[in-house]
Amino acid sequence: MQPLRRGDVGQAVGEVRAMLASIGLLNNQSSSAALHFDEDTELAVRHFQQRRGISVDGRVGTETYSALTGAHWKLGDRVLAHEAGQPQTGDDVTVLQTQLIELGYPLARADGVFGLSTAQALRGFQRDYGLIPDSICGPDTLRALRQLGRRVVGGRPQLLRDMVAVAEAGPSLLGKRIVLDPGHGGSDPGVEVDGVSEAELVWDLSSRIEGRLSALGVQTWLTRGPQNGASDEQRAQLANEVGADLVLSLHVDGSESPLANGIAAYYYGAGESSSTIGERLADLAQRELVARTGMLDDRIHGKTWALLRLTRMPAVRVELGYLTSAADRDKLSEPLYRDTIAEGLLVAVQRLYLPVGDDPTTGVMRIPAEAR
């Protein structure tokens, strides 16, 4: 859809204002402003985007509109069921998933998408509670959910499961399954400055990381080739289909300001719903890269971008610098510098699986050359 922004007028703006009003972010009583995307509307959109882990730009594009559409659903407003090909989405699904997780049923995260894993968890709950196991959240299932408390106590259930899964995986990278996602590609070159393309840079970086991981016995997949691209949904689907342990998504940023520079890492996170292991990996990657490159630390951030939200395993997106910054661009154009980035990300992945007592100081660990 064409993004809506301040100054736009029409029925589409009226619909957005009505949705913002329904969740208490906008006073929509003035008939004169009902169809106008004014300053109050932009501020409400920015507030909503920040609260939902969406890039804050004050515009209503596809991602923001989809999140707004789902935000007005409350659990019990409609019957929820798994619909292959076009799953139901919304805040009511998120609440249902959160309750199932707190009851101890295995779900990767509360992502607001009623997929197959949610249907299986709901069926398990229905079977345990003596209901018809049809994976449909109707009145009887809702009544049963409201009567029960948490089965898991002493911490966040998903955090406990994630910690156990990482510990059981062991410290060796041999046999681990990692999907590398070079951003953009095909008809979408990403950021381009002075003949330097984001898509080409991250493809080169992904190839360098793939070689290092393969030498250590890691099974790797790339979400695209050197000449083609894919949507974030397709990339997430690939990672889910191969049963990856981790996803590393590589990007380079751009800004209207030439002063913007530095490295940032992103994990799935929105409010109380987040990927704990994703956050840990994002932190490790950020600290390793900043220590090894001397780039500005733009820190880590929780986001609900499709690739982070739709993957069933921890996924991290790393913005490796700004092509619009002359200093960052010069560094990223150097092959040896890209080797440094590849090494830093490899060490971050290794540190994720090391026991706390064996975890070395940031920036000092080296993967032996003979292992590659």
Image (cartoon, helix red, strand yellow):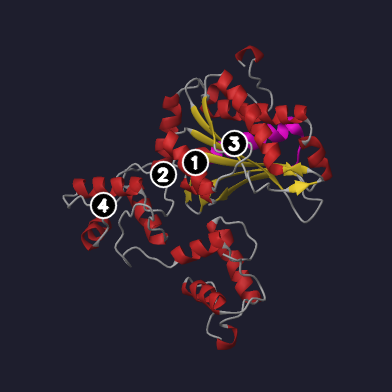
Q: Quadrant for residue 288, please give it.
A: top right
State the separation of the CA atoms marked 2 and 1. Answer: 10 Å
Q: Which residue occupies 57% across, 56% down?
A: 54
Q: Quadrant for residue 214, please give it.
A: top right
| SS of the residue under disc 2 | loop
Q: Vertical placement of 213 versus 61: above or below?
A: above
Q: Which residue is mark 3?
A: 225
Counting residues from the start of the chain, the first of labels 4 and 3 encountered is: 4
Counting residues from the start of the chain, the first of labels 2 and 4 encountered is: 4
State the separation of the CA atoms marked 3 and 1. Answer: 30 Å
State the separation of the CA atoms marked 4 and 3. Answer: 38 Å
| SS of the residue under disc 1 | helix
State the separation of the CA atoms marked 2 and 4. Answer: 24 Å
Highlighted range, magenta: 279-297
CB contact under 8 Å: marks 4 and 1: no
Residue type at tag 3: Gly
Counting residues from the start of the chain, the first of labels 2 and 1 encountered is: 2
Q: At which x and y percent is residue 217?
A: 52, 19
Counting residues from the start of the chain, the first of labels 4 and 1 encountered is: 4
Residue type at tag 4: Ser
Tag of residue 135: 4
Q: Which residue is mark 1?
A: 276
Point out the frontmost of discs 3 and 1.
Answer: 3
Counting residues from the start of the chain, the first of labels 2 and 3 encountered is: 2
CB contact under 8 Å: marks 2 and 1: yes
Counting residues from the start of the chain, the first of labels 3 and 1 encountered is: 3
Q: Nearer the viewer, residue 340 or 285?
A: 340
Q: Is residue 288 magenta?
A: yes
| SS of the residue under disc 3 | loop
Q: Which residue is mark 2?
A: 156
